[in-house]
Amino acid sequence: MRSFTLIDFVSLFAALRWTVALVVLALAFGAPLALALATGRISRFAGLRWTMAACIQVIQSVPLLGLLFFFYFGMPMFLGIQVPALVAVTVAYTLYTAAFLGEIWRGGLEAVKQAQWEAGACLGLSAWQQFRHIIAPQALRLSLPPTVGFLVQLIKGTSLASILGFVELARAGQVVSAATFQPLLTYALVAAIYFALCLPLTLWSRSLEARLDGPR
Amino acid sequence: MALVEIRDVHKTFGKVEVLKGVSLDVEEGEIVTIIGRSGSGKSTLLRCINALESVDSGEIRVEGEKVHAGMPDLKAFRQRVGIVFQAFNLFPHLKVERNITLAPLLTGRIDKAKARALAEDVLTRVGLADKIDAWPEQLSGGQQQRVAIARCLAMAPHLMLFDEVTSALDPELVGEVLKVMEAMAKQGMTMILVTHEMGFARNVANRIVFMHQGRVWEQGPPAKLFANPETPELASFIASAR
Amino acid sequence: MNFLPLWRYQNQLIDGAIVTLELTVIAALAGLLIGIAGAVALKGRITPLRWLVRGYIELFRNTPSLIQIFIVFFVLPSFGLKLPAFEAAAVALSLYFGAYSVEIIRAGLDSVPKNQIEAGQCLGLSGWQVFRHILLPPALRNAYPAVTSQFVLLLLGTSLASQVAADELFHVAGFIESRTYRSFEVYAVICVVYFAMAMSFKALFAIIGLAAFRWPRRR
């Protein structure tokens, strides 16, 4: 046992790079997939809608921890090769992001009134053009508050990667706490860092929402 | 003693003085219509009569009892004064019958066995006996407003207040509500109405009160007031209302 | 891929699922009570109390549930409060659920137009009567979807209690894994169990919602 020093303090902050990396990866792969799911959910083809809805339901009805472990153990087994933990974890977070963001964005798309689509059609725009220029921007504005809210969930969710050995913030906390026998100081710091990351986003999401309701 | 005595009432909202010394008496059985432009204070005055708004100075008495938010039995007082709102305010989660019988049952005015009969009775008076088991959402605006009136009647009030009750209705639905109010007037109910319906004011009211800039500007019987307005403000109001 | 070795651990899986349910229900009920208290405090006039509730909400919504469980389990003993794993997780999860419930309940109460309350008061009903008959039913209906979806998230979130060795389903999975070395199969199976539990609750809540809230929605 040694005392809590500056090194421990710094190591907590250094662990943030994994937290950020996981979030960035999840968004980079999850956002496009979410867009596909959202547009699929409002498509004309009932089969497509139902399949996407089922996929989303499944992912949302399983613990995030379960998703992580499923891919961590499942990918090497099914692909027959050594899969780096990062890849498995990225797949899990990507699907998690895609499912939740997909639902949020579907809500945004559906909230744009049907009349807007019709107005676009009357102007002679194709379905894709209607989507790109008229519907998507409005849907984006509407979805922004809950999207930012989900970002907070995602940041918190990266703490679960600690269980699979990633030295992100939660894991660094465990290590430091064990080494210094100072759980209070360590976890208070860890909580404070998460808080500092998440609170601004939460407040931003709220102000976005207020602005949406405002000029009306 | 008049049923309603309003003496020199002042009321301020924030920085704006909305009522600047209003005095008015309403006798039992009278039908008084308050008219005036938006912002003249008419709705505020009405809402002061049943203590939905507080008065800053002056006094309001109903049946001799002083009206204010802290009065000893505000609940019992409100059971004697019915108010019908512009937005109907029916309870959406209760069927029409329950909307009507909720207050009589909860205040002990009536017991469960007699509740449905009471609902049928007041609904018949407003011409909606067949809607007793409907949900408010299933009714038209005019029907909802008539149910709102029936809801008040179920409490057998001594005084009825109407706050622009037809302003939110489609034109073709206004008539059915005015008919009900006319019938109530004929049955001797004391009524104070804030309204834009000049036809009703002219034909049914005993007295018109014209409010302007927070004061009672002119009042009198409808025939006289509409034919010979004494003040230019009333004259221009009548002209613009045509 | 071989699921057979898992068969003999059926009972442990069932026990784990039961503990998961117990943990969920306890945390949900406690959390709802906290939520009601918090919503009432937020609508009250004691400013320091409102700030306290706001602080509590923001703290628990902006930090990971895992860290909250760690703090209750590892840190509280320094203050003399040493809780066993299940109880520690229950406390942490209750506080977490409570923080979300306050907002949901407050929003539900605010969703009822003031006109409705006025109409009730003008009929001569008492404050309590207005609350119980006029405010509460529509507020409950409006809050219901949010509360039930948070409940399902809580159910899934109890898996984190495994990290302090509470005997819920996820921890049982780890135990079975250590005995059978069939890692993927074990976690696949419990994912299915969680899925079944989550879907069952969603169906149950849907049925309850239909039965309890029968009046038509606003056009």
Image: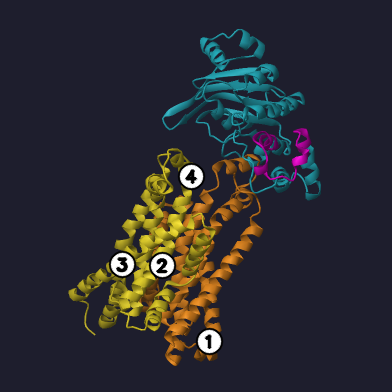
Chain colours: A yellow, B cyan, C orange
Q: Position of residue B196 (x, y in %)?
A: 59, 23
Q: Which chain letter matches label 4?
A: A
Letter of the chain that mark 1 sits on in the rendering: C
Where residue B165 sits: x, y (%)? Answer: 62, 30
Give the magenta part as a residue range. Answer: B123-148
Chain-order first, disc 3 or disc 4: 3
The residues bearing labels 3 and 4 have C-alpha atoms spaced at a distance of 33 Å
Q: Quadrant of the C terminus of chain C?
A: top right
Residue in the foreground of this view, choosing between B99 and B31: B99
Q: Amino acid at mark 4?
A: Lys
The residue carrying mark 1 is C12
Separation of marks 1 and 2 at Cα, in angstroms = 28 Å
Q: Element at badge 2?
A: helix
Q: For the residues carrying marks 1 and 4, which lies nearer the camera in this image?
A: 4
Tell me, yes or no, whether dots 2 and 3 are on the same chain.
yes
State whether the magenta stretch is mostly helix, strand or loop. Answer: helix
Q: Secondary structure at mark 1?
A: helix
Residue A96 numbered tag: 2
In the rendered image of this protein, does residue B7 appear above or below residue A13? above
